[in-house]
Amino acid sequence: MSTPVRTAIFPVAGLGTRFLPATKATPKELLPVIDTPLIQYAIDEAQAAGVERMVFVSHPSKGAIERYVLDDAALRASLREKGKEDLADALREAALCPRGDDVVFTMQDEPLGLGHAVLCARDHVLPGPVAVILPDDLILGTPCLPEMVEAYGATGAGHMVATMTVPRDEVSKYGILDGAETAGRITRASGMVEKPAPEAAPSREAVVGRYVLDASIFEALATQEPGAGGEIQLTDAIARGAERSGLAGFRFSGTRFDCGSKAGMLRATLHLAAQDPDYADVLAEMSAPAPRAA
Ligand code: UTP
């Protein structure tokens, strides 16, 4: 039996500059796709994977994330006073702490990079491998982390990253697996290259924001030099540990949306709206020819 993945880390301390001015006051991770904030999708995925502890690496200016994630008993009480029992029940169901969940908030005071954010979680994780979920990589359909965790033990690799095959002209937007050999959903790799030029890319297996990492990642991050953009890059630390720990890519079954970008957020919203009969009229209006001005 393989070592269980007991902790999920949510790095949520970034500045979200691509969504300014919205992210001046609202953390990117709380932006909704229809009515559900990105962070909620990530939490649901971690819970479906059966993790015991959730560690949120946040920033002091992003207290709204903590307020969203944790229970607000006063708000629930005021809803009940107004007779809005259903809403109060829904809030209780979605919030983490009233159900005895094991939740930790820790701060990354400066956004020094994704790798640095993961390192900030080091003192708060349970023994064994850890999962890392980037909430702005939204994966709809089959939840990604549960299927990754299930596949993890059988690969024998210490580090596993979620991957999708991208067209060659898009490889420069992603971390790309090096020395990749794919069989079914699993790609064995010898390393990773961050945002290569199309002609230099070693494969078309692109890494997206779900990771299951051997605990040795923390030691690698602690000694990791700044990389692209002067930031401590998670990709660099995974690549350094690939030889010793083993690295596998996992081709997930769901559909991924880059909700760190405006176009990706719009695509995700339209994707969900198209599946909901409540929005059929709205979408029909949008695809109908515009009425002529009188
Ligand atoms: P991104 O690079 O997509 O987020 O990081 P960002 O830097 O906030 O966004 P832009 O590029 O300025 O628009 C992916 C995830 O990693 C977190 C972010 O909060 C996001 O959830 N992150 C990134 C950190 O927690 N700390 C960092 O130093 C960088």
Image (tube, rainbow, N blue to C red):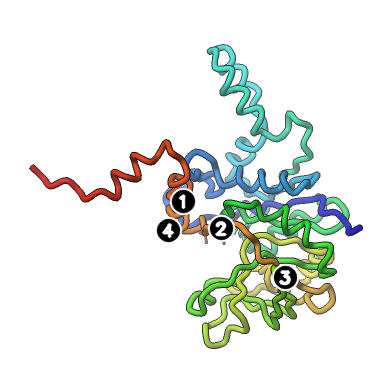
Q: Which of 225 and 291 is in front in this view?
A: 291
Q: Distance between the residues labelled 4 and 3?
A: 29 Å
Can you identify the residue that label 2 sits on?
Answer: 255
Instruction: Note whether 258 is above or below 289 in the view shown.
Output: below
- Tell me which numbered mark, 3 or 2, is placed earlier along the sequence: 3
Instruction: Note whether 86 is above or below 167 in the view shown.
Output: above
Can you identify the residue that label 1 sits on?
Answer: 271
Can you identify the residue that label 4 sits on?
Answer: 263
Q: Which mark is residue 186?
A: 3
| Type of amino acid at the residue the image marks with label 4 | Ala
Residue 59, horizontal then vertical, whole percent: 63, 49
Q: Which residue is drawn at 53% across and 13% down?
A: 82
Q: Residues within 10 Å of mark 1 (few under 14, many from 20)?
A: some
Say which of marks 2 and 4 sits in front: 2
- Tell me which numbered mark, 2 or 1, is placed earlier along the sequence: 2
| Type of amino acid at the residue the image marks with label 3 | Ile
| Type of amino acid at the residue the image marks with label 1 | His
Q: Check whether the beta carbons of the residues at disc 2 and disc 1 lie within 8 A of each other.
A: yes
- Tell me which numbered mark, 4 or 3, is placed earlier along the sequence: 3
